[in-house]
Each structure stands twice: as structure tokens, then as C-alpha cells.
Image (cartoon, grey):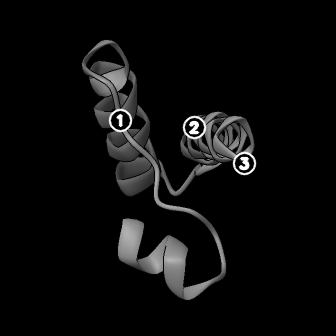
Amino acid sequence: MNLDLMNHGFNPVIIKKEDRLKYYEALDKAHTTGNYTDFIKLITKLEIEMLKKYLELL
């Protein structure tokens, strides 16, 4: 997933241990129902967290 994110100009994300179950549930829902809303929301949240970390480093 991170390779795909980077290929499209996004930062790689870190899925923390506490977010892992949400990630798997969202991924399963997207795969089984075709509804990617929860998955996109989670990845967007994680992407924003990574952007904030990069800005803190700058």
C-alpha cells in the first residue's frame, strides 16, 4: 500500500498497533462489499498524521 501511495505522490503511512484492527476491518469491508469509504477515511487520517510529523521535523 505504501508503495502505491508513494507512486501517486503521497507519503507512506504507519499503521499503529492500536489502528491495526480498524485497518483490517476497513480493508475487509472494501474487499467484500466494494465500499471503500471506511478504508479511505482511515488512510486519509493516517496520511494527515504523517504530514504533521514531516512538518514538525522541518
Amino acid beneath label 1: Ile
Residue 56, image x, y percentages: 70, 35
Image: 17 above or below 54: above
Tell me the SS state at disc 3: loop
User: Viewer-proximal residue, 36 or 52?
Assistant: 52
Residue found 63% across the figure and 46% down from its top: 47
Q: Residue furthest bottom?
A: 7
| Residue 32 at x, y percent in the picture | 36, 50
Above or below, 18 against 26 in this view is: above
Residue 12's place in the image compared with 44, above or below, is: below
Nearer-N-terminus badge (1/3): 1
**On the image, which quarter does residue 11 sit in?**
bottom right
**Which mark, by number, is residue 15?**
1
Q: Does dot 2 land on a helix, a strand or a loop?
A: helix
User: Dot 3 corresponds to which residue?
Assistant: 58
- Residues under labels 1 and 3: Cα distance? 22 Å
Residue drawn at (38%, 77%), measured in percent from left and top? 3
Quarter of the N terminus within the rendering: bottom left
Q: Using residue 15 as the reference point, say whether residue 4 is left or right of it.
A: right
Q: CA distance from mark 2 to mark 3?
A: 19 Å
Q: Earlier in the sequence, mark 2 or mark 3?
A: 2
Residue under pointer 2: 46
Q: Is residue 27 left or right of residue 36?
A: left
Label 1 close to label 3 by CB (< 8 Å): no
| Secondary structure type for disc 1 | loop
